[in-house]
Amino acid sequence: MEGKIIDKKLILNGFVYVKSKDEKNGPKTCWDCRLVRQKTCKVRAITTKRPNSAEIVVLKGGELNSHEYPPNQELCRAKKSELRSK
């Protein structure tokens, strides 16, 4: 799965995730679906970066069929544009 991180948000498979925590002494980052805090969705993802690369690798979570709602490509495009303009 390919994801992009923009301003502490992960865009993955048509869903927006917010950073929940970083591993203290390691490269892993935990993410919550943007609707977890509203108790509308329970999906989480764990990512890491490849050494000497900007590539994001999804280690766990983020599957399309595990969300409580369908993906929203328009929202992801809007978030990417909004975050780049900051």
Image: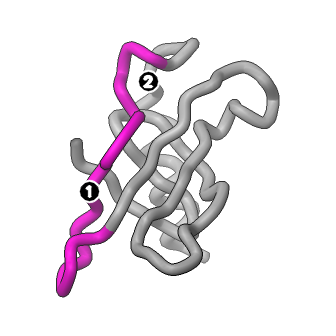
- Residue tagged by mark 2? 71
Q: Is residue 42 left or right of residue 57?
A: right
Asked which secondary structure carries label 1, the reply is strand
Disc ID at residue 2? none
Residue 58 lies in the magenta stretch: yes
Read off the magenta span.
49-66
- Residue tagged by mark 1? 57
Instruction: Quadrant for residue 38, please give it.
Output: top right
Determine crowd level at label 1: few under 14, some 14-19, many 20+ residues with C-alpha closer than 10 A: some
Q: Position of residue 17 (x, y in %)?
A: 55, 46
Q: Earlier in the sequence, mark 2 or mark 1?
A: 1
Instruction: Look at 61% across and 76% down and name the residue there.
Output: 86
Instruction: Quadrant for residue 5, please give it.
Output: bottom left
Q: Position of residue 29 (x, y in %)?
A: 49, 62
Q: Position of residue 55 (x, y in %)?
A: 22, 68
Position of 29 relative to 78 (above/below): below
Instruction: Look at 47% across and 42% down and name the residue there.
Output: 45
